[in-house]
Amino acid sequence: VQLQASGGGLVLAGGSRRLSCAASGRNVNAYTIAWFRQAPGKEREFVATISWSGDWPSYADSVKGRFTISRDNGKNAAHLQMNGLKPEDTAVYYCGASLGSLATTRPTRSDFDLWGQGTLVTVSA
């Protein structure tokens, strides 16, 4: 399975952006999908995750209420709708996939073995 993240770019604070994660090579309907982000000089951190069925989305406290994760199993894709963007949201955003369900709603990087190449989101004040 290969993951391709897209949709990044420059946005003003308070604006919105929709990221997409397209999977190829295999159907990812049975995979848990997550978004992580990595700001310059910082560790990759969890943003949001969604189960294979589309149920039980979970978010980092820093984005809860502003970001929405979704998936379209028919198109083998997942999305991250980001609203109310802040300068501190600036980072490279990565989508990850893990076969099956996770035992945690706060996964770490090591819970995912498939990663896309990342897409840069820059939020200017």
Image (cartoon, rainbow, N blue to C red):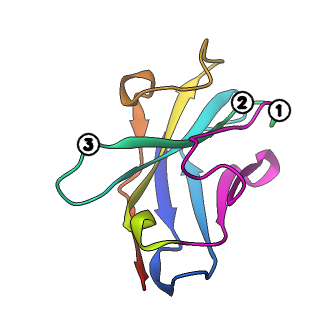
Residue 51 is inside the magenta segment = no
Dot placed on the residue nearer the N-terminal end, 3 or 1: 3
Q: Quadrant of residue 106?
A: top right
The front one of 10 and 13 is 13
- CA gap between label 1 and label 2 equals 6 Å
Label drawn at residue 55: 1
Question: Does dot 3 land on a helix, a strand or a loop?
Answer: loop
Residue under the image location 78 percent in, 45 percent down:
73
- Residue bearing the label numbered 2: 51
Q: Position of residue 45 (x, y in %)?
A: 39, 42
Q: Quadrant of residue 112?
A: top left
Disc 1 to disc 2: CB gap under 8 Å? yes
Residue under the image location 42 percent in, 35 percent down:
114
**Residue 60 relative to residue 53: left or right:** left
- Residue bearing the label numbered 3: 43
| Residue type at tag 2 | Ser
Q: Position of residue 94 (x, y in %)?
A: 43, 52
The front one of 77 and 112 is 112
The front one of 88 and 34 is 88
Question: Does dot 2 land on a helix, a strand or a loop?
Answer: loop
- CA gap between label 3 and label 1 equals 27 Å
Range of magenta residues: 56-85
Question: Does dot 1 land on a helix, a strand or a loop?
Answer: loop
The residue carrying pointer 3 sits among few (fewer than 14), some (14 to 19) or many (20 or more) residues within 10 Å by Cα, namely: few
Q: Quadrant of residue 14?
A: bottom right
Residue 75 is inside the magenta segment = yes
The residue carrying pointer 1 sits among few (fewer than 14), some (14 to 19) or many (20 or more) residues within 10 Å by Cα, namely: few
